[in-house]
Image (tube, coloured by chain):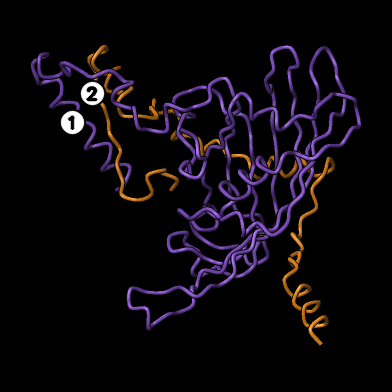
Chain colours: A orange, B purple
């Protein structure tokens, strides 16, 4: 009686593969890359000379006599928004 | 803030900056960058390793969402050290030889970077939530010292509901956070054998996602729908030295 129960439990715990609905391969790779790639207007913000850290900007500003623009938001410290 | 208002703030700031005497414009007695960044993850940027730009966005669907939500995309960076970048190439370059990508590489990408951040910020997945995966690397050819590499695979990540205890342990309630992704993966890259580095890396992960997190903006879109990720080589520009969103999970010191 226990064996079938264990067997049915182990089946229930197997990951159920969800069909991703998208086949990927050489044939549609370029098309998919094109769809996912940023459009030119989506890259406009990269033209600003951002620095990844405040301090590298502070050092550069001190040398070149330029102000620092600090763009701040509250949210994830990784800034992924 | 509108772009116009932001521009006005910057104009005013610049005027005020120019009106200051130089002694007040220039920061004095700066501590060194190493000192200022001693506990920041940026100092671990793997300049001699592999840095991937990970772009996420929804794929086309029948009930295309209107407004910014339908056009949203997000960026993240995936880091691999000089040693770790070799996880992506086979042990030898015999054309046609298929080999598994080490589990650590697949887990890093899937748990930390294949997250639904298209509309906002979200959380990584745990190791347990990676239900099944397979990712292989294969050398297609070698020409002029450059190996052409192909990656193929899939991942299934599935976070199930769990019983969470509040501060008042008598009111235990189920966690509402049910989410996951089922993705196929395909990519092509070029590895310079002599220099020991990638000169090209393009990978797509595409499939379905479902569920929500507190701040990922999917409350009106929590059912199974398509999304994709594009991973490409990032150059060394300062912009591309932003650490991975979930860098704490990397375990680097």
Tell me where residue B178 appears, x and y as whole percent.
Answer: 56, 69
Vertically, is A8 above or below B236? below
Q: Tag 1's secondary structure?
A: helix
| Marks 2, 1 in one chain | no
The CA span between labels 2 and 1 is 9 Å
Q: Tag 2's secondary structure?
A: loop
For this rendering, which residue is in front, B13 or B196? B196
Vertically, is B218 above or below B79? below
Dot label at residue B202: none
Disc 2: which chain? A
Quarter-of-image position of residue B197: top right
Tell me where residue B128 appears, x and y as whole percent.
Answer: 62, 58
Tell me where residue B200 appears, x and y as whole percent.
Answer: 69, 26
Residue at 64 percent across and 55 percent down: it is B227
Residue at 41 percent across and 74 percent down: it is B165
Q: Which residue is mark 2?
A: A67
Q: Are marks 2 and 1 in contact (CB under 8 Å)?
A: yes
Vertically, is B252 above or below B212? above
| Residue B75 relative to residue A17: left or right | left
Q: Which residue is mark 1?
A: B13
| Residue A79 relative to residue B33: left or right | right
Quadrant housing the N terminus of chain A: bottom right
């Amino acid at each position: 009686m226990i064996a079938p129960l264990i067997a049915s439990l182990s089946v229930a715990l197997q990951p159920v593969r969800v069909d991703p609905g998208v086949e990927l391969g050489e044939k549609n790779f370029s098309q998919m890359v094109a769809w996912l790639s940023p459009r030119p207007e989506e890259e406009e913000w990269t033209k600003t000379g951002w620095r990844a850290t405040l301090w590298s900007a502070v050092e550069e500003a001190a040398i070149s006599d330029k102000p620092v623009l600090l763009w701040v938001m509250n949210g994830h410290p990784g800034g992924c928004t | 803030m509108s772009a116009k208002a932001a521009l006005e703030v910057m104009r005013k700031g610049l005027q005020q900056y120019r009106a200051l005497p130089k002694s007040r414009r220039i920061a004095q007695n700066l501590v060194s960058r190493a000192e200022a960044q001693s506990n920041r993850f940026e100092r671990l940027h793997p300049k001699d390793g592999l840095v991937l730009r990970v772009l996420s966005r929804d794929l086309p669907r029948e009930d295309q969402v209107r407004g910014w939500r339908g056009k949203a995309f997000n960026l993240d960076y995936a880091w691999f050290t000089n040693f770790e970048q070799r996880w992506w190439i086979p042990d030898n370059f015999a054309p046609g030889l298929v080999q598994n990508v080490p589990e650590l590489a697949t887990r890093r990408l899937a748990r930390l970077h294949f997250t639904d951040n298209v509309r906002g910020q979200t959380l990584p997945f745990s190791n347990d939530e990676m239900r099944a995966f397979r990712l292989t690397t294969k050398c297609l050819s070698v020409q002029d010292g450059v190996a052409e590499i192909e990656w193929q695979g899939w991942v299934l990540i599935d976070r199930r509901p769990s019983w969470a205890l509040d501060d008042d342990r008598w009111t235990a309630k189920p966690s509402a956070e049910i989410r996951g992704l089922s993705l196929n993966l395909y990519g092509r890259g070029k590895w310079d054998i002599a220099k020991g580095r990638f000169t090209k890396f393009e990978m797509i992960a595409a499939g379905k996602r479902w569920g929500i997190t507190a701040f990922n903006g999917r409350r009106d879109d929590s059912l199974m729908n398509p999304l994709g990720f594009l991973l490409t080589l990032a150059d060394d520009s300062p912009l591309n030295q932003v650490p991975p969103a979930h860098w704490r999970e990397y375990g680097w010191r």
